[in-house]
Image: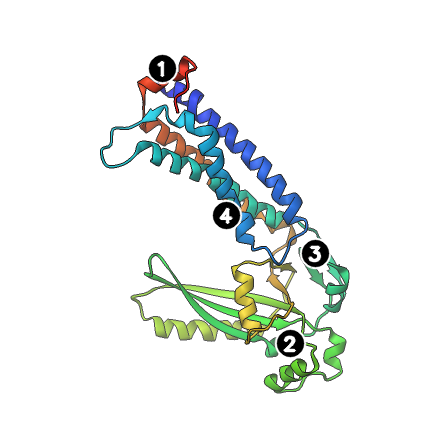
């Protein structure tokens, strides 16, 4: 028990201090310089994932590594210090990443506009509530895609829908024809390609060894049926998507060719605005607690390196 308390005092508590300082410092940096004024030229993954991992690597190898070198485990096949460094980096990076996604959802006010044309005039906002827009779900672009998970054993089917957000007055002036292709050809020719789009996604998971073709066709038909029945009629608010994977998938659905078209892509949300970050909050808290508990368990399993421990207690350099 004395050894456990010593590990907590000499190794785990410094880890907690490092985690709190790194989390607070990077969260403030990300909030101040990116989340308040997002740029479409910076991928979200860089700010939310890559930079936190880089910070965790620097922080652990610079400040926590001397404490980690106090621990070891007999293992002829692996390097105990390399294992400890990797696990500690993960235990710092994961909470920082999870809290950045929480900040991403929690930051930003809901801007209420009367019509879609007011979105560009009102300036940037993270969330929008549009009072009136034309119901153009029959003109929506549709795209089907499949990805895999679990080393290819699970297939994830995606059905993307993208509908142009047009003022009701524009629709009332018979701007659109019955033929969707002719409609958008007219938009291309006139250079008035709709700049604002409302998008939504359906997903379905299936094991690869099952009857995937039949399930796939059923999924596609059910998605189309549900979309054409409901569309965006029950929408509560819209989330302006940054440069992330989902936004790029929606853009592929909208822009068929290699066009450098500036688009405002809004993800449709059907839950109350006040609950927009409930899931991210739970994931951030649980993920942080699991990371800390897992690293503490690793510290308990590892043994003291008596020579380095004695040198450390005598305040000698142990690098």
Residue 134 seen from this side: yes
Q: Residues within 10 Å of mark 1 (few under 14, many from 20)?
A: some
Picture quadrant where residue 88 is located: top left
Q: Which is more foreground, mark 3 or mark 4? A: 4
- Residue 26: x and y, percent? 58, 39
Whether 173 is drawn above or below 29: the answer is: below
Along the polypeptide, which appears first: circle 4 or circle 2?
Answer: 4
Residue where numbered disc 4 is placed: 50
Task: Report which residue position mark 2 lands on.
Answer: 136
Of 208 and 91, nearer the camera is 91
Visual colour scheme: rainbow
Alpha carbons under labels 3 and 1: distance apart: 57 Å
Q: Are marks 2 and 3 in contact (CB under 8 Å)?
A: no
| Quadrant position of residue 299 | top left
Question: Where 11 sits versus 112, above or below?
Answer: above
Quadrant location of the C terminus? top left
Residue located beneath label 3 in the image: 125
Q: Is residue 279 visible?
A: no
Q: Residue at x 49, y 29 (%)?
A: 16
How many angstroms separate mark 4 from mark 1 (CA)? 37 Å
């Amino acid at each position: 028990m004395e050894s456990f308390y010593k590990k907590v005092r000499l190794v785990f508590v410094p880890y907690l201090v490092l985690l709190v300082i790194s989390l607070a410092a990077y969260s403030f940096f990300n909030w101040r310089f990116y989340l308040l004024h997002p740029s479409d030229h910076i991928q979200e993954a860089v700010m939310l994932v890559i930079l936190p991992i880089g910070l965790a690597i620097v922080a652990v190898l610079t400040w926590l590594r001397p404490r980690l070198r106090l621990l070891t485990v007999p293992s002829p096949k692996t390097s105990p210090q390399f294992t400890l460094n990797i696990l500690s980096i993960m235990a710092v990076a994961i909470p920082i990443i999870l809290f950045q996604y929480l900040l991403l959802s929690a930051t930003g006010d809901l801007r209420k506009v009367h019509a879609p044309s007011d979105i560009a005039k009102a300036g940037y906002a993270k969330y929008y509530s549009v009072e009136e827009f034309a119901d153009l779900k029959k003109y929506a672009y549709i795209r089907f895609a499949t990805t895999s998970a679990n080393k290819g054993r699970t297939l994830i089917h995606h059905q993307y829908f993208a509908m142009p957000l047009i003022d009701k007055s524009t629709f009332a002036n018979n701007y659109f024809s019955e033929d969707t292709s002719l409609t958008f050809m007219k938009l291309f020719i006139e250079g008035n390609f709709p700049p604002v789009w409302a998008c939504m996604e359906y997903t379905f998971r299936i094991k690869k060894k099952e009857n995937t073709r039949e399930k796939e066709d059923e999924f596609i038909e059910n998605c189309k049926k549900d979309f054409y029945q409901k569309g965006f009629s029950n929408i509560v608010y819209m989330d302006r998507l940054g440069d992330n994977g989902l936004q790029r998938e929606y853009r592929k659905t909208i822009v068929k060719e290699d066009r450098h078209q500036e688009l405002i892509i809004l993800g449709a949300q059907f839950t109350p605005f006040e609950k927009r970050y409930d899931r991210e909050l739970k994931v951030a808290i649980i993920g942080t607690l699991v990371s800390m508990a897992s690293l503490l368990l690793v510290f308990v399993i590892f043994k003291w390196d008596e020579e380095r421990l004695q040198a450390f207690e005598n305040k000698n350099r142990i690098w």
